[in-house]
Amino acid sequence: MYAARRILKKMRYGEATVTVVDPRSYMTYQPFLPEAAAGSISPRHVVVPLRRVLPHAEVLTGRVTSIDQDRRVAAVSPLVGQPYEVPFDYLVVALGAVSRTFPIPGLAEQGIGMKGVEEAIGLRNHVLEQLDKADSTTDEEIRRRALTFVFVGGGFAGAETIGEVEDMARDAARYYPSITREDMRFVLVDVADKILPEVGPKLGEWGLEHLRKRGIEVHLKTSLVSCVGGHVELSNGVTADSHTIVWTAGVKPNPALARYGLPLGPRGHVDTLPTLQIRGSDSMWSAGDNAQVPDLAARAAGEENAWCPPNAQHALRQAKLLGDNVIAGLRGFPQKEYKHASLGAVAGLGLRKGVAMIKVGGLTLRFRGRIGWYLHRGYHGMAVPTWNRKIRVFADWTLALFLKREVVALGAMERPREEFYEAAAPVTAAAVTRAEPAGQAAEPAERGGRAQEKEKAAAG
Ligand SMILES: Cc1cc2nc3c(=O)[nH]c(=O)nc-3n(C[C@H](O)[C@H](O)[C@H](O)COP(=O)(O)OP(=O)(O)OC[C@H]3O[C@@H](n4cnc5c(N)ncnc54)[C@H](O)[C@@H]3O)c2cc1C
């Protein structure tokens, strides 16, 4: 989206046509997914509709399935209907990354990813639904499972998501008579010996202590061994039964790249020159999480063989230079090299909790707690694309200062036709039998003990 915008901005009228192909009709600002999952930002405000921000481009909602470099055509598989070909003179490949998974028993069936806004919405509804379930059941086992939340991976995505979701669940528990924070079990697992490596060891250590103080169980140097049927087994022998297993253990370049016939690096990224041109081509470029771009700033500082890490800071800047280089290629001008020294990193761990590492000149400044959180919000609030979204996000945050957090679970949103179907479907004998199995009504169990306990504790 950024590259296309740049090309359209610099292009002379009629000089070229720009076609953007994406299976989603919107761009997602992923750093805000944890806040969207916690309800601090409306999910609609973390996405930007492509057709609105690229009014002069042709936007096709579909997937590029293959590229024929000799005939210069891309095969597009649209949302519906037959695939077709789109011819091109210049090509930009920016498919991003997908969750990196391992063949762990049960993971594919039980895991929840955190790469898209749909997953953030789903996770929020799911977690609140677990509180609804736990509060309304008389079965201790169901309750324990519902109140156990496991997150695998302690980088940006994992640490921020567990921080935000735990904060939301703690907040929401106030409205559930039988649930306190102590009844919930939050588990964070990582194979590394630290969390949040992006913000450096000092802030990572602070983040770890902070999460532990909030009652989150953190297991380092530990991996997920199995989660069949929601029964979680960790390599250190710890077990948990849970309906919520969130997988945030890193990303890998989009596997669709393997079908494009482009030169790939050892880990499947598009092999890209510092000019963002794909190696061996002067009319194809790549950037972002799917590209292996030499990190010239780190190399100049003595880090041999450094590559740009997969983050939004690089992706957005690369996209702008890429746009300029496409225009330069179109007009026969020289290409510029991408060189960007990291400005630092910020992470939010829930309301008014965060860390920020800011690099100014040769100095590295570190902030944590409330100031770290303000810097996290300030940075991302300004980085989210378009003024429309910036204003909406700041409005969400401002409203949240005065109104309480929204804690309604709209899980039924994923099955909107269910109730109508039940009303409209012909009533058959089989349906009646299924709904009310004769003579099998369970004895109603006692409920309410826990709620009274919580009331007493509150009163005491
Ligand atoms: C939860 C989370 C938190 C993060 N937090 C931070 C942070 O705090 N700071 C930071 O700097 N970075 C953060 N990141 C990383 C950052 O968001 C990514 O590095 C950045 O989004 C990469 O941009 P991209 O354009 O390369 O890929 P994406 O933004 O993933 O875009 C790729 C696009 O390609 C499309 N696509 C996929 N397959 C096809 C196909 N076959 N044909 C056509 N289109 C296709 C996708 O639909 C998508 O729109 C975070 C990521 C996550 C998931």
Image (cartoon, rainbow, N blue to C red):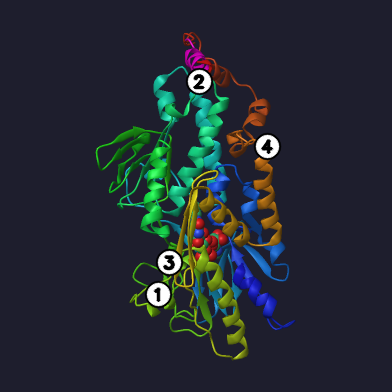
Q: Which residues are magenta?
A: 446-457
In primary-sequence order, the first of circles 3 and 2 is 2
In primary-sequence order, the first of circles 3 and 1 is 1
Give the foreground label among 1 and 2.
Answer: 1
Disc ID at residue 321: none
Disc ID at residue 298: 1
**Picture coordinates of residue 3 (x, y %)?**
60, 72
Structural distance between the alpha carbons of marks 1 and 2: 53 Å
Structural distance between the alpha carbons of marks 4 and 2: 24 Å
Q: Amino acid at mark 2?
A: Ser
Evaluate whether residue 17 shows in this view.
no
Q: Which residue is mark 2?
A: 178
Disc ID at residue 403: 4
Few, some or many C-alpha atoms within 10 Å of disc 2 (few <14, some 14-19, many ≥20)? Answer: many
Foreground pick, 391 / 134: 391
Q: Give yes or no for residue 64 being in the magenta stretch.
A: no
